[in-house]
Amino acid sequence: MKFKTFEDFYPFYLGEHSNLQNRRLHFIGTSFVIVLIFAIFFTGNWWLLWLVPLMGYGFAWYGHFIVEKNRPATFKHPIYSLMGDFRMFWDILTGKIQAF
């Protein structure tokens, strides 16, 4: 599928994350990523940078391959998928979509 805009992509992205456990795993992974980025910025410990993709993709890919049993959209739409992850994180945080 081809998407012209992120707004066209996001409903597809949410459909790939219909399982609540998968959404929770994404939320947890994104939370770790945000904490790590702040930790790196405030402490200057750049060695923590290697943990960012590990936390972000580790939780997300477990959610897709094991829980949701689908293929992560990041393989075909990496930029939109990254944007979708942070948008879904915000939508969960603000209660717009359910995960907990």
Image (cartoon, rainbow, N blue to C red):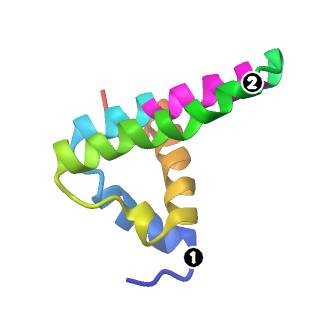
Residue under label 1, please give it: 5
Q: Most extreme residue toward the top, as rendered?
A: 43
Residue under label 2, please give it: 40
Circle 1/circle 2 CB separation < 8 Å: no
Q: Residues within 10 Å of mark 2 (few under 14, many from 20)?
A: some
- Whether residue 86 is visible, yes or no, is yes
Q: Is residue 48 magenta?
A: no
Q: Which circle, 1 or 2, is nearer the viewer?
A: 2
What is the three-letter code of the residue carrying label 1?
Thr
Relative to 31, 34 lies left or right: right
Identity of the residue drawn at 46% across and 70% down: 9
Relative to 42, 34 lies left or right: left
When the figure is inspected, residue 9 is found, relative to residue 60, above or below; the finding is below
Identity of the residue drawn at 52% across and 27% down: 31
Q: Position of residue 53 (x, y in %)?
A: 54, 41
What is the three-letter code of the residue carrying label 2?
Ile
